[in-house]
Amino acid sequence: MTSESDALRAPLTALSGVGPALAEKLERLGLYEIEDLLFLLPLRYEDRTQLVRLGALTTGTRSLVSGEVLLAETVYRGRRSLLVRIGDGSGQLTLRFFYFSRAQAAQFKAGVRISCFGEVRRGPAGLEMIHPEYRLLRSGEDPVRSDALTPYYPATEGVQQGRLRNLTDQALRRLERQAPEELLPEDILSDMALPGLADAIRYLHRPPGDADVSELGKGTHPCQQRLAFEELLAHYLSLRRVRVAARTDAAIPFEGGDDAIAAFIEALPFTLTGAQTRVVNEILGDLAVPHPMMRLIQGDVGSGKTVVAAIACLKALANDVQAAVMAPTELLAEQHYRSFSDWLTPLGVQPAWLSGSQRAQARRDALGAIRSGNAGLVVGTHALFQEGVEFRRLGLVVIDEQHRFGVDQRLALRNKGAADGGYPHQLVMTATPIPRTLAMAAYADLDTSVIDELPPGREPVGTIAVPESRRDEVVERVRRACADGQQAYWVCPLIEESETLDHEAAEARYERLTEALPEVRVGLVHGRMKTAEKERGMRAFKDGRIQLLVATTVIEVGVDVPNASLMIIENAERMGLSQLHQLRGRVGRGEQKSHCVLLYRSPLGRLAKERLAVLRDTNDGFLVAQRDLELRGPGDLMGTRQTGLPEYRVANLVRDAFLMPKVQIAAETLLRSEPERANAIVRRWLSQAGLYTRV
């Protein structure tokens, strides 16, 4: 591959007007070199190529108009504002300013001609624009119309749109002298009818006046798809590179332990489902190979992933290596610690516990046991991969709720086990079912197993949506359930009352329910409690000493109470589908029919109605996840804000999902026949992010 032009790889300070201070601000947008500007695509476009007559304006549009000032006045109708009335013979328009100076108001003299751009809205006295961009015209001067659509870029503090347009203008002039290297093979471009890279970049930064603004707004223009394809390909290649490298790495093959596993399964108080048995066999097959297993288990809430992970850990322990189980929250990690202890202590295995909130002496004891190898099985939070944690011989890493961690964190724990024997095997799990195209993009470095069967006797949870005006009926339903010997959850989004958010607060709801239900034993659990306090509350609920548990969403994971058959969720309209499904999965674990009540605040918006309807209609986690993906996007579903999924600059995993099968084919071809081209694609899109690197 030939090297790209120095003109584009130069630092941003080579551009006119960019000093060290501005360059530092631009770094917040991921801009380091001039070429980076070419890949900073506009978020949206505005059409300033056409001058619209005032009589032809329609509400909701952003338009360029011109007219003569007819009247300007400062009014005090509840709020001080400047009203400027303009006309052009075909109609009139009011310009409304809330923030203005005396000198600014004096500019708008009757008879002065003005051009302005803004959103047309319906006002008290007809159509108006609020704080439009405007320019006073000199005598005989015509309004300035753009030759191309006006781009609006991702912004950061201290960098205005005008500055970004100026910088991209400079970068585009360099593009004319030397275009970025075309890295997609010609057969891919022709097969998909995609434009070349330079043409796509030029078009997207400065679309012609006749461009389809609607198509560009939807992100479906061929030029956008051209760049989205390459970005998806870069991310996929980076993950596959990790996977391919792992196939050449060494790992300890686990050969013994079959008898211990058979005895363990036989002693369980339940029978494994067919899906669990299938996945166990897939895992044991991977563990017998002298290369690191990299497998993802997907399974809906309550499908029995944890016992499958316990069998994998038992296999590791039987082969004289350590196993580490990591969960994203102390609550979930504690649940795993209890489950593993209950299952494995009778076999002579006492798990060790490691978390960030441990007392100093307990932490020193745990670190010593891990270092010496006396702790064969270690359960904990992200504290497991922090500095100072040394394993004697780590052979298996199990990570639950993988999407809460992200690839880099997973590799950090993996590298804790790097030794002469190679790398540890990896087993990652998620209870957030992931649509196939999203899994293809997010987990391309993993083999996937799906536990698509719930334990026998599990009835679907009946789900209804109820307006909060019927709260008293819901409270009465809780009273009857508790009187019948059942238990209930009442989930609220916040811990305390908030002046800025009107979500139901857990502490306030706890007080009200305690007062309304004096005969019911009510408990409270939330994330700000100390670990021991939360543990006591959870244990009391699990043991039946608490009948109604008021909680925040901390109980989304980590509590298994078979007697709990009723789930009330406040402000359900504010939550995503996947989170609601996770919460609903806390009930329905026993023999009695269970129900989930989604309390919402009226009026419901269109998206909220759609979300709640999905929960009413299905208990299938994969269907729920697919609709969540469509309604909210991959960032919210997968926990981007918790580093689980990378942010994309151009691509959108929902909109561009149809590209993934061809991305997959192109990636495998490039890795096999043109690895240098594959590396160049990854460097172009991910070089500054440092994602998915091998440490």
Image: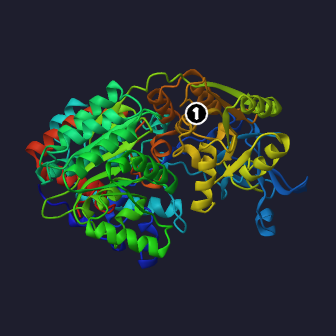
The residue to which callout 1 is attached is 587
Q: Is residue 319 above or below residue 476?
A: below
Q: Nearer the viewer, residue 225 or 653?
A: 653
Question: From the viewer's perspective, is 658 left or right of 459?
Answer: left
Image quadrant occupied by the N terminus? bottom left
Residue beneath the point at 33% across and 68% down: 369
Q: Position of residue 116 (x, y in %)?
A: 66, 50
Q: Residue at x 66, y 55 (%)?
A: 134
Protein image colouring:
rainbow
The residue under the point 87% across, 56% down is: 79
Quadrant of the drawing holding the C terminus: bottom left
The x and y percentages for residue 152 are 50, 52
Where is residue 310 drawn, in percent x and y?
34, 44
Answer above or below: position of 154 versus 184: below
Q: Amino acid at mark 1?
A: Val
Q: Residue at x 41, y 33 (%)?
A: 269
Looking at the image, how many numbered discs can be counted on the residues? Answer: 1
Residue 306 position in % (x across, y down): 39, 41
